[in-house]
Image (cartoon, coloured by chain):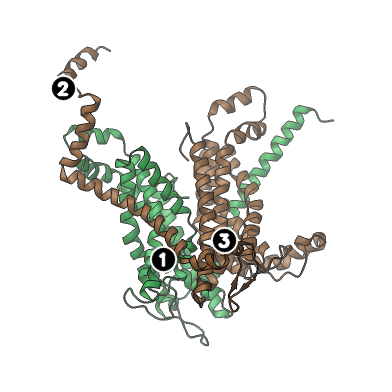
Chain colours: A brown, B green
Amino acid sequence: MYMAPHADHALSGTQAPGVLPKIIIRFAGRFMRPADALAYLLTLAAASAIFAIVVIIVYQLVAGSVLSRHTFSWNFLVTSVWDPIAGRFGALPFIYGTVMTAMLSLLIAIPVGLGTAIFLAEQAARRVSDVLTFLVELLAAVPSVIYGLLGIFILVPILETYIVPPLQAVFGFLPIFSGTFYGVSIFSAGIVLSVMIVPFIVSVGREVLLSVPAYLREGSFALGATPWQTISRVIVPYARRGIYGSIFLALARALGETMAVTMVIGNTPQIKASLLAPGYTIAAVIANEFTEATGELYLSSLVELGLVLFAVTFVLNGLARLMLIGASKGGKEV
Amino acid sequence: MISHSQRKKIVNRVMFALTGLCAALTVGTLFFILGFLVVKGGASLNWDFFTKLPAPVDEIGGGMANAIVGSAKVLLLASALGVPVGFLGGLYLSEYGGKVPGFVIRYVTDLLNGVPSIVIGIVVYEWIVHRQGHFSTFAGGVALGIMMIPIAVRSTEEFLHSVPSSLREGAIALGAAKWQVIATVVIPAAMRGIVTGVMLDLARVAGETAPLLFTALNNQFWSPGWNNPTATLPAMIFSYAISPYEDWHRQAWAAGFVLLSFIVCINLIVRFSLRYRIESVV
């Protein structure tokens, strides 16, 4: 306060220009200093390159699948015959396997992931929570092929010996648990996938929960609610958009996951009611057959499968990002 | 008879015990995974693994020296392509991107991050392998390079943003041009963070297998130069794990152990050198 008049006086000598001159100066400066122009153009080129890469991805998928799209049109998506020798290709068994494994993985990952996120955001002391979050995110850093390795040699034997026999003894009458279990199956793939997507739900979910304003929590406590009532009726509903966003991200990952699924699903293009039967997914069939595909139509059909996968994950990721942007509005960016 | 307030306290206890159980299950899974790789992989590891070529099918022994070198070459090329583009892209977003272009590029980058890795493999196959007529280290490097871009962009942007504005203002007050401010003040201040971001990025693509299946393919021998198919650790783990041979399974575990050790080490180094999380990575 005491210094203010003096400071004002000092500033008045170098009066700041108005808004319009400022813009002109900025523009002129940008184009008059060659070094500045160069720096700007260089970064702009890199940013445009990223845009161009996404355009190239779309172009290559669309152009590569022309033959298949023209031959089968929309029937491609609803036909269940996959016969490379006869040259007939239908994507239905792969779409079915992809959807079933993804749903199964969400069924496990959503409750476990949300529970973990709630524990980390609301229960654990901040320091403990940070360490545990690091460990959970390390799960996301484990490569897919290593999940596959563990799936083949650890999970499948455990399922064969300890899990599936009692499961079938009790629930064997249900179609989804019927039939002979060979170890590799949609069920095994779903379990592996669930471990792989849990980190996404936990990590994003925790951030979303932490960004809920404190006054909501305090208000709820003031009304006599227990901590659990506060979480289940105030905090989670408030953060629901962000939580949906995290689930969409996880779903997109599950649909596109390749190596681990390829190694434990059994790679059999069939549609069976039983989860214990082998299946096949879009990503897995591409991984297995792409380099061996003989003939234009075969390759083109595989590229079309890639296009389907790309389109679905593109939409899901787009929705997830929009939800997360909405969820973080006014709060911390997630 | 349990009163209402007693019941809500019991529910509170039970639900929090359940969330704790979820957390224990999630973190426990990680230790389960690390434990198996250390036990099974550690027992399978020997000096031959690092120094010898893969043995022919009917022989026991051999190693994966070519796959280790192959992975290093692919990752080197991927970094050479992905890091500059990602770094400059992040610089654009942080320093030049206006509201609309900034939003578009940021959104596209996030979408690129979400593209399934197998799709990147198809695209690079159609784009490079199909045209050149052969699989190569080069194509594998391009595929992984594309995958590195999104995280490099987001972590660069994040660390540039975290540079205090007082530093920028100080430099501007001294009469520095915008590029001088960025090059001599902002980037050096954010350098440590940017480098660790790139390291995490490298750790993430080091284990990618799907994009290499149709680009770098695989190779039982050394792969000279950049234009031949090459073995990589992840691709070797895949082909050895699904093979019917006992000794190959042993080597797959060894390779998994080496690969995961590399990834976990990078994550630990980053964690301890930064002391906080990079949020854009997952």
Residue at the image point whose x is 72% and y is 36% from the top: B11
Q: Tag 2's secondary structure?
A: loop
Residue B247, percent across and down?
A: 55, 80
The image quadrant where one finds the N terminus of chain A is top left
A235 on left or right of B171? right
Indicate whether A151 appears above or below A127. below
Mark nearest the camera among 3 and 2 is: 2
Q: Distance between the residues labelled 3 and 2?
A: 65 Å
Residue A61 disc label? none
Residue where numbered disc 1 is placed:
B124
Q: Residues within 10 Å of mark 2 (few under 14, many from 20)?
A: few
Mark nearest the camera among 2 and 1 is: 1
Residue where numbered disc 3 is placed:
B33
Residue A313, percent across and down?
A: 53, 54
Q: Tag 1's secondary structure?
A: helix
Which residue appears farthest toward the bottom when viewing the image? B58
Residue B22, percent across and down?
A: 64, 48
